Amino acid sequence: MEILLDGLQDPGVIELLQAHLADMYATSPPESVHALDIDALSHSSITFWCAKRQGEVIGCVAIKELNKTHGEIKSMRTSAAARNQGVATALLLHLLDEAKRRGYQQLSLETGSMDFFAPARRLYQRHGFEYCGPFADYQADPNSLFMTRLID
């Protein structure tokens, strides 16, 4: 598996992001969906990577710079065919390394409170993320949980 910077042009990336958004809207009320579409992911504050195996897109992740010391995880997704194969862990470790390289002191995320999101929450907890209150522009929402981790 290789993790590559991506310009959001690859048809496999677009398909993965469309599936991600479809799941978010199927699982959460529209006002509680904070997943970004391709246009929003193209913002200059966001860096996007995809994971590929033998040329096939199997996962993605992005980091949004909130300020010079704080980043936010966005669009973490593994393809259905690649689940439970370590893709999400590899993407998260890549992001933690990138946050450290950038000099961030903190990395945070928003995820859903429903059972659908439990595997993601367990992954983040295994890697040192703890629950916290809303950050950046988020507001308290019963459909959202917030997690953060200090960067060593």
Image (tube, grey):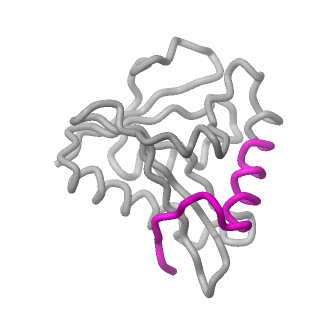
For residue 112, above or below residue 23: above
Depth check: give the residue in front, 52 or 127: 52
Q: Is residue 67 left or right of residue 89?
A: left
The residue at the point 47 percent across, 70 percent down is: 4
Over which residues does the magenta segment extend? 1-23
For residue 42, above or below residue 109: below
Residue 13 colored magenta? Answer: yes
For residue 68, above or below residue 20: above
Rendered location of residue 56, percent (x, y): 67, 78
Rendered location of residue 28, percent (x, y): 75, 28
For residue 66, above or below residue 2: above
Rendered location of residue 82, percent (x, y): 67, 71
Depth check: give the residue in front, 75 or 116: 75
Residue 12 colored magenta? Answer: yes
The residue at the point 63 percent across, 41 percent down is: 39
Which quarter of the picture shows residue 54? bottom right
Depth check: give the residue in front, 114 or 62: 62
The residue at the point 59 percent across, 24 percent down is: 144
Q: Is residue 70 left or right of residue 48?
A: left
Rendered location of residue 69, percent (x, y): 22, 35
Which quarter of the picture shows residue 117? top right
The residue at the point 22 percent across, 42 percent down is: 104
